[in-house]
Image (tube, rainbow, N blue to C red):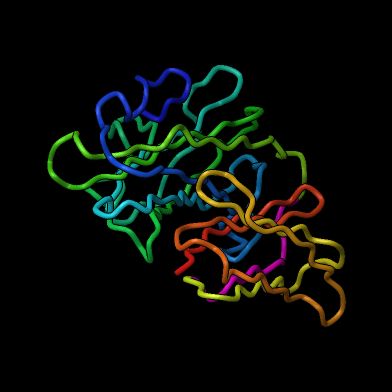
Amino acid sequence: MTGSPGSAGNCTSCHSGGGGTTSGTIVVQLKSAGTSSVPVTSYIAGETYIVTITGGNPTAGLDDFGFQFTALKGSDNTAVGTYSNLGTTAQTFPSSNPTLVEHTAAIPKTTGLYVVSFDWTAPATSVGAINMYAIINAVNKNSMQTGDKSSSTISLALVDKTSVATVTSEVVVKIFPNPVVNTLTIDLDKADAGIYTIQAYNMSGATVASMEMNIGPGSYKGTVNTSDWVPGMYFISIQKDGYKHVVPVVKQ
């Protein structure tokens, strides 16, 4: 029900009536580079990646969520890759020949966010472009389909970089405090020198702040004034030379 090509639609066909807007993002990181590494928009055959789906809905009572995720080959929309490190909140389906990952039960919010992570290993040989699709369903746990609010389809395209030696990066991105009250600090430790574009946008996609960070020797921190932001969830986007790192932040 991710809304991806070949799916049976999406969650809105059954779950409806809930308030607010449910939205989210898919972030992919090279597992060997760690969870602080810069997210990638490409893959190398046989490598394992951490997939993190993050979202939210500010409506009271929608404090749990379910999800589905699939990775499809761009050329014919067949499922590709294998899954592991699912934890206790997710499972593959169907069990005999998995084509997607989904929740096992309603998953509670973590510091105001819907967050789930698992590992995805790219196919052993190059298959060209791969498209990832996901959907998040915010639920009120009344054991009915009423009062829930699902997101629209979330997607991420991965370019085939199998012939490239590596796509790792030493950049360590730290954004704190999270949740934030008045001032958000962005720390780009080990980042290459240059100009980084920082944007903050709300769950409706509207930009609420925009700035540039000039990274040089001994200068790798910047701050964003969040005192005028309405309480809720925001996304901080950090971009430079084709790289993009998105971090969800809760404003108190």
Q: Nearer the viewer, residue 131 or 125?
A: 131
Q: Quadrant of the C terminus?
A: bottom left
Where is residue 54 drawn, in percent x and y? 46, 52
> Which residue lies at the image location 56% right of the left edge and 55% below the top edge?
235
By secondary structure, the bulk of the magenta-drawn segment is best described as loop
Q: Which residue is painted at 40% across and 49% down in the image?
A: 84
User: Is residue 102 within the magenta segment?
Assistant: no
| Residue 67 in the image, given as x and y percentages of width and height | 35, 41
Q: Is residue 149 left or right of residue 164?
A: left
Q: Count of labels shown?
A: 0
Name which residue lies at 60% across and 76% down.
183
The residue at the far bottom in this view is 218
Q: Closer to the camera, 250 or 118? A: 250
Q: Quadrant of residue 15?
A: top left
Quarter of the image for the N terminus: give it.
top left
**Residue 186: x percent and y percent?**
66, 71
Residue furthest left in the image: 143
Nearest to the observer: residue 236 or residue 98 = 236
Q: Is residue 245 left or right of residue 134?
A: right
Residue 130 screen position, x and y as percent: 59, 31
Residue 173 is left or right of residue 50, and the answer is: right
Between 203 and 77, the residue placed more toward the observer is 203
For the record, the magenta segment spans: 166-178
Q: Is residue 169 magenta?
A: yes
Q: In the displayed structure, would residue 1 be above or below residue 62?
A: above
Q: Give the vertical position of 203 relative to 93 (above or below).
A: below
